[in-house]
Image (cartoon, grey):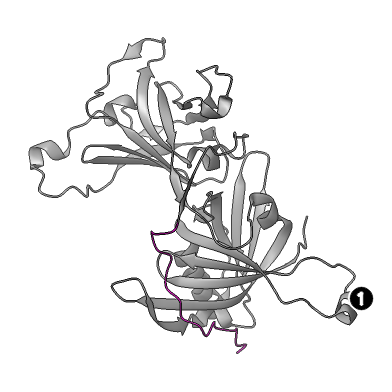
Amino acid sequence: MTTLPVPDKMTSAPTQQTPAIKGQAPEPTKATTLQWASHYQWQLAHVKDQKGNLVNIDTANPITLAVAPSSLSLFQGCQHFSIDFGWMDAPPFEYGSDLRQKPSDCKNTPSNKMNQGDIEALFPKNGLLKLGITLSAVAENKLDNIQMAPKNLMIKIENGNTLIFTGKPLAFRKPTGLPIDNALLERYDWQLKSAVRNTFDVNRKIISRQSIGDFYHPEFPVSLIFRGYDDSQYASFNSNCNGVGGPYILMRDYTLLVGSGMQTVMGCGITGNRIENELSKLVSNSKSTLSLSLQPSISSESQSKNQTDFPRYNLLQTFDSGETLIWKNEVKKIP
């Protein structure tokens, strides 16, 4: 079994004292609408029916929207509904999704008030949304400084209502390491070099580290590819089997959100299936933080033998669930 390096130094998890950054996310293209929208806190401003008539909504108990790579979440009081998308396409989301009620995290709330809200009434009653949902940025405010204009997000439901949300920029911690953007992630293939599972104390300080054994098998090396399409951004994790992954969002503080997507179901043997299942549990619908650093320079003799010279990076990926992966960039095999 090949042994991948495990960092020796135990470090603390990122703390909330890190300076915050705040500002407008770059204006979206079709492929980056989800990424752009995830940088704002959205609140429902008004609703129109199919004929363009305004629909009454409860402004005293506002409906808010959170955007993730494979889902939209709507909140009102103790109510939480989500619309999950099992596809890699960017908006408009087609071929169907449904509005599902999620368990409430409200405590000490009377049962007769737990289900009070207007979210369900805004969507078609048949449960299945024949999407149709078009998620797009709209400019309703023509100001000289477009960056200072309030941001608006439209959710247009096929054969249903149109929901307009207004957004306020979220504040983010200042990221660490070298600059990271979608173009850099998509420029290379990334090979896993280290995988550990961390244990924390009550102050989120790492007290122990253990290698993730399933990710060290020589016949099933783990790799990562980021791809940008005309209408989407996709992260694909592979262990020499089917591959798992989903749409991805890179936040301004280098938080990486990965959704879930379709995959083949080819049998890969007992070991291959076990490794891929472990990989799927870790990365599907995951949240992690990225930090980029340069690897030590290689000798000039080694460089002369290498026909393709490029910067060597280490990409540190720290999951909210406690795992830490280190990736090394390689020349992209398939452009």
Q: Which residue is mark 1?
A: 304
Q: Position of residue 136 (x, y in %)?
A: 53, 29
Range drawn in magenta? 1-18
The 10 Å Cα crowd at callout 1, few under 14, some 14 to 19, many 20 or more, is few
Q: Which residue does the image show at 43% across and 65% down from the upper left?
A: 14
Q: Where, by quadrant of the figure, is residue 210 drawn? A: bottom left
Relative to 286, say whether 210 is above or below: below
The reply to whether residue 262 is visible in this rendering is: no
Given residues 280 and 23, the one toward you in this image is 23
Relative to 25, say whether 177 is above or below: below
Residue 305 shown left or right of residue 238 in the figure: right
Residue 246 shown left or right of residue 54 in the figure: right
Q: Secondary structure at mark 1?
A: helix
Q: Position of residue 161 (x, y in %)?
A: 39, 21
Which image quarter holds the N terminus?
Answer: bottom right
Q: Position of residue 72 (x, y in %)?
A: 41, 40
Residue 246 within the segment the image draws in magenta:
no
Residue 15 within the segment the image draws in magenta:
yes
Q: Amino acid at mark 1?
A: Ser
